[in-house]
């Protein structure tokens, strides 16, 4: 394995290999080479679906440092995978995994998998959850997904680039490199757009750091709006460039899973 890779990427590569080995065991009982996930986690995981029904956050605590992932799908054949993207220098104990691309009002099943600091592979039983009916309807088309990032306070690494905040995927993140309340991101919409709302979806670490509490925007380097609580906010303006600035946060590697700019219908 390339020692020049960032520590997180090396752990991710190790986890990928481990999951292939787990998958090769089939869907039956755990083998002597694959331990029951319950050995390192005495409590069932908690799944918190987003009100939109399109994402869900899974949280679980392990008794030893481990790197974890979740295989999930609508049937027990699963078919999709989400990983814990904590940026610690090694495995850790408080795990948070974002499941994306979900369908509202739908039943899902999932299995926890991972590798512990003891070198063992772990796999859980199959759990289930249901997404809610969508309760939050965007006020317009999100034109930020067509935007270009033209300035950013900093990037933790290439894996956490600013472009991740405008790719329409809540499973990817822009992370600053320790900017805290000084983190900002500027996007160019490519044209003058009549806007009816914006959104800033905060990234967060399992220890509570890197969580944005409030943000503001500046349009075309002139007009400022906010501060708004992290999430979506109604605001009306016409402009081309939008600067998202973090106003208050819990500090650390602040950033966003996604920023949004909604064009008037």
Image: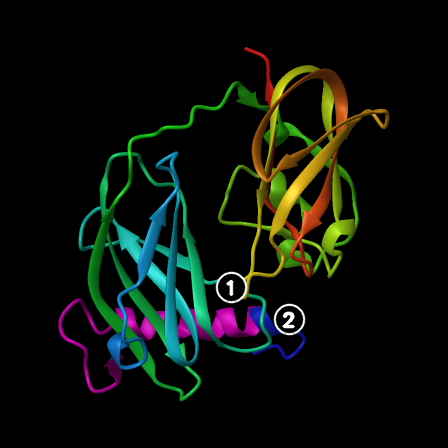
Question: Magenta stretch?
Answer: 9-35
In this view of the protein, which residue sits in the foreground, 70 or 198? Answer: 198
Question: Alpha-carbon neighbours of circle 1 within 10 Å: few (<14), some, or many (≥20)?
Answer: some
Give the percent coordinates (x, y) of residue 261: 62, 26
In the image, residue 25 lies in the stretch drawn in magenta: yes
Q: Looking at the image, which residue is at 58% across and 72% down?
A: 88
Viewed as shown, does residue 14 lie left or right of 124? right
Name the secondary structure under disc 2.
loop
Q: Is residue 48 shown to the viewer in this render? A: yes
Could you tell me how far apart the alpha carbons at marks 1 and 2 are, in whole angstroms? 19 Å
Q: Are discs 1 and 2 less than 8 Å apart at CB?
A: no
Name the secondary structure under disc 1.
loop
Q: How many marks?
A: 2
Viewed as shown, does residue 100 lie left or right of 160? left
Q: Height in image: 239 above or below 152? A: above
Q: Height in image: 65 above or below 56? A: below
- Image quadrant where one finds the N terminus: bottom right
- Of mark 1 and mark 2, the one earlier in the sequence is 2
Q: Looking at the image, which residue is at 70% across and 60% down?
A: 156
In this view of the protein, which residue sits in the foreground, 115 or 248? Answer: 248
Question: Alpha-carbon neighbours of circle 2 within 10 Å: few (<14), some, or many (≥20)?
Answer: some
Give the percent coordinates (x, y) of residue 164: 61, 46
Q: Height in image: 112 above or below 219? A: below
Q: Residue furthest top?
A: 265
Q: Which mark, residue 206? A: 1
Occupied quadrant, residue 61: bottom left
Occupied quadrant, residue 189: top right
Tag 2 residue: 6
Q: Residue furthest right?
A: 222
Label 1 or label 2, whichever lies nearer to me, is: 1
């Amino acid at each position: 394995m390339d020692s020049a890779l960032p520590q997180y990427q090396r752990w991710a590569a190790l986890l990928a290999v481990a999951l292939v080995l787990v998958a090769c065991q089939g869907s039956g009982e755990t083998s002597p080479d694959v331990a029951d996930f319950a050995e390192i986690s005495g409590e069932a995981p908690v799944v918190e679906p987003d009100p939109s029904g399109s994402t869900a956050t899974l949280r679980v605590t392990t008794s030893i440092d481990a790197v974890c992932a979740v295989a999930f799908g609508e049937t027990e054949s699963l078919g999709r995978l989400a990983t814990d993207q904590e940026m610690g220098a090694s495995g850790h104990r408080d795990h948070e995994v974002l499941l994306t691309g979900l369908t509202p009002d739908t039943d899902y099943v999932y299995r926890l998998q991972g590798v512990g600091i003891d070198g063992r592979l772990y796999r859980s039983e199959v759990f289930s959850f249901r997404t809610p009916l969508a309760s939050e309807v965007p006020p317009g088309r999100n034109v930020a997904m067509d935007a270009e990032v033209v300035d950013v306070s900093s990037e933790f690494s290439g894996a956490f680039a600013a472009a991740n905040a405008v790719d329409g995927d809540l499973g990817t993140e822009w992370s600053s490199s320790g900017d805290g309340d000084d983190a900002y991101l500027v996007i160019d919409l490519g044209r003058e757009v009549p806007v009816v709302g914006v959104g800033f979806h905060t990234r967060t670490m399992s220890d509570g750091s890197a969580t944005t509490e409030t943000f503001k925007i500046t349009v075309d380097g002139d007009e400022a709006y906010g501060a708004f609580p992290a999430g979506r906010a109604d605001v009306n303006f016409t402009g081309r460039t939008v600067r998202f600035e973090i106003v208050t946060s819990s500090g650390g590697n602040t950033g966003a899973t996604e920023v949004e700019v909604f064009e008037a219908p």
